[in-house]
Image (cartoon, grey):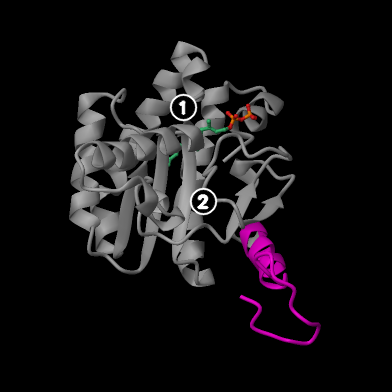
Amino acid sequence: MDGNGRWAVKRGLPRLMGHKRGANRVKDIVKASTELGVDTLTLYAFSTENWKRAAHEVEGLMKLFRGYLQNNFIELNAKNIRVKFLGDPTPLAADLREQMEKLEDLTKDNTLITLNIAINYGGRDDLVRATRKVAAKVQDGSLAVEDITEQMISDHLDTAFQADPDLIIRTAGELRMSNFMTWQSAYSELAFVEKSWPEFTPEVYAEVIADYRARTRQFGAIIPKGVTGAE
Ligand code: FPP
């Protein structure tokens, strides 16, 4: 969800106003996802590197997450949305962690869409934590080293038992992955859009999805021209 800061600075506003705008954008994009037939939407809200930002910006972002959870707690469940948090919650404030756990638990059987919210998430950190879980099983004798498979690693990541992302969209013209789903993105399609996150309307989103749907995905195979169902 890039470009909140620039969106604000361009308008002579404090960066946090951009994040606030960005947070307001979340609702329509979740709704649009359900209309566009997206079954899982992940929002990269705060990376393991974002702690390096100025303390007041970090505090402001945490306040926004807290506000989002408080204001949307009931509605997310009422709308049949399953919420899952990705990332290591350990450094987050206790009340925030408690709200996150409660919301995950409340919505765990919902089926309309899965909304992953990545907070204190890093693709490398995800892999380190998964490796530790797998290594602990080897250490206690419940897993043999030869039995470690790609699927097993996937199933120990924060996205355990979810499909890998089909499409990763980055806003505000940035052309990097910035530590997002390092393992899971092996075959993801990428879309880079110039619009900042506050300007990422459902219409822009629909265009990006239409562009994605027109692509042929081969996953490393070679599919003869004219053959459909490459996926
Ligand atoms: C990146 O833009 C954005 C962030 C680090 C924060 C994103 C968080 C929100 C939109 C808050 C609400 C989220 C939820 C899930 C309720 P940037 O600050 O790097 O922008 P810049 O590149 O223009 O400086």
- Classify 224 as above or below 220: below
Q: Picture quarter containing residue 89?
A: top left
Q: Is residue 192 magenta?
A: no
Return the x and y of residue 37 as percentages of the image width and height. Answer: 50, 72
Which residue, given by chain and number where applicable, does mark 1 sit on?
A: 48
Instruction: Decide if ligand 1 comes within 8 Å of the CB at mark 2.
Output: no
* Callout count: 2
Q: Earlier in the sequence, mark 1 or mark 2?
A: 1
**Residue at the image position 30 percent from the left and 25 percent from the top:** 92
Residues 33 and 118: in front is 118
Return the x and y of residue 90 as percentages of the image width and height. Answer: 28, 26
Is 91 displayed left or right of 51 in the figure?
left
- Classify 93 as above or below 164: above
Q: Mark 2 is on which residue type?
A: Gln
Q: Which mark is residue 184?
A: 2
Is 37 displayed left or right of 106 in the figure?
right
Prevalent SS, magenta region:
loop
Q: Mark 1 is on which residue type?
A: Thr
Q: Residues within 10 Å of mark 1 (few under 14, many from 20)?
A: some
Furthest toward the top, the residue is 55
